[in-house]
Image (cartoon, rainbow, N blue to C red):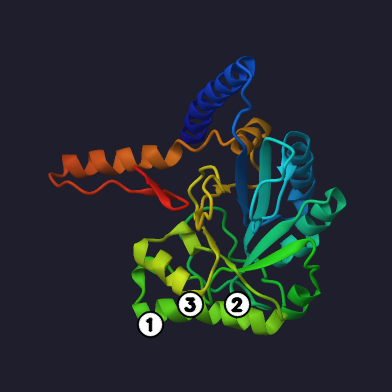
Amino acid sequence: MAKRIMNLTISILVGICDWLRDGGSRLVGRKPRKKCIVLAYHSVSDVQRAQFASQMDVLVRIAEPVRADMDAFPAQGERYAAVTFDDGFQNIVDNALPELSKRGIPATLFVVTESLGGNRGWEHLGGDDTRQERVMSVEQLRELSPELVTIGSHTMTHPLLPSIEKSQLRQELSGSRLKLEQMLNREINLLSFPYGSFNDAVIEGCREAGYERVFTALPVFAFSQPGEFVSGRVGAAPTDWPIEFRLKLAGAFRWLPYAYDLKRHVRSVLRGRIVKPVRIKTGEKKIA
């Protein structure tokens, strides 16, 4: 709880700075730059449906909903948000998609192909415990409207991608894409990294597998560069506090990767060894 409050406090300060900067731009006759946040959900249980619906009401009031596979920002608007779900749980079909449909909000589901129709079979490494959740079936996946729901890959078995052999990496990336394309008879161009974990070899493997865009768990602004291949997302949950959710939509949590990098660097110095700083990838640029 203390860590959550500290993160919220810093994010409030970031949000205030953003508000002042955007206000200053308007005062001198300049439009603030367009900004987009991609939300990454995992589970929406029966008891969380009302909370999720309230969040989506907030989203449509303060941002323009967009698809995660869009090529360019719409002409109108300054703030955009895309809604994504990792793992493909049954409760997303039951509770989240109906609420999105009511509001005309598009969604992207990142699916673990070898778990369809069963329970999740991957290791729990933190976050909300979804080990008892059932994964949607192939039939349910096929019934989803392409106009509302974009399907992406979340690999075949949900491994920690940087830790597996190159041959297995190729199978996880290419095999899942091929299986989904054959299953749904449509192109699969998006992928999200299991556990948010990736490195340069994983990104290169995604390019070789034919993906057009991949998603991390870094809570930075998305689609900020032309031809962006690596996009950030901010983790969201129906249990987020209202102010917490609004700040996530505003991109005010984007300081977190830099804080993690600084913490990692300080620890390495204290242990007597220097490590290279993590590079936060946004599109084709690398921001230290």
Q: Amino acid at mark 1?
A: Ser
In the rendered structure, find residue 172 and report the number of the disc placed on it.
3
Q: Position of residue 73 (x, y in %)?
A: 66, 46
Label disc, if present, on residue 167 of the rendered structure: 1
Precedes in sequence: disc 1 or disc 2: 2
Q: Is residue 141 above or below residue 53?
A: below
Closer to the eye: label 1 or 2 = 1
SS for dot 3: helix
Q: Secondary structure at mark 2?
A: helix
- Mark closer to the chain start, 3 or 1: 1
- The residue carrying pointer 1 sits among few (fewer than 14), some (14 to 19) or many (20 or more) residues within 10 Å by Cα, namely few
Report helix, strand or loop for mark 1: helix
The front one of 12 and 178 is: 178
Q: Which residue is mark 2?
A: 113
Residue at screen point 64% across, 47% down:
237
In three-dimensional space, the C-alpha distance between marks 1 and 2, rounded to whole angstroms, equals: 18 Å
Image quarter (top left, top right, bottom left or bottom right) of the C terminus = top left
Disc sitting over residue 109 in the figure: none
Residue at the extreme top: 27
Between 120 and 38, the one nearer to me in the picture = 38
Q: Quadrant of residue 70?
A: bottom right
Check contact, mark 1 vs mark 2: CB within 8 A.
Answer: no
Query: As drawn, which residue projects farthest toward the right?
Result: 102
| Relative depth, front residue between 279 and 154 | 279
Asked if 46 appears above or below 247 in the picture, the reply is below
Amino acid identity at mark 3:
Glu
Residue 267 percent location from the top left of the image:
24, 42
Q: Position of residue 272 (x, y in %)?
A: 12, 44
Q: Is residue 39 left or right of residue 100?
A: left
CA gap between label 3 and label 1 equals 9 Å
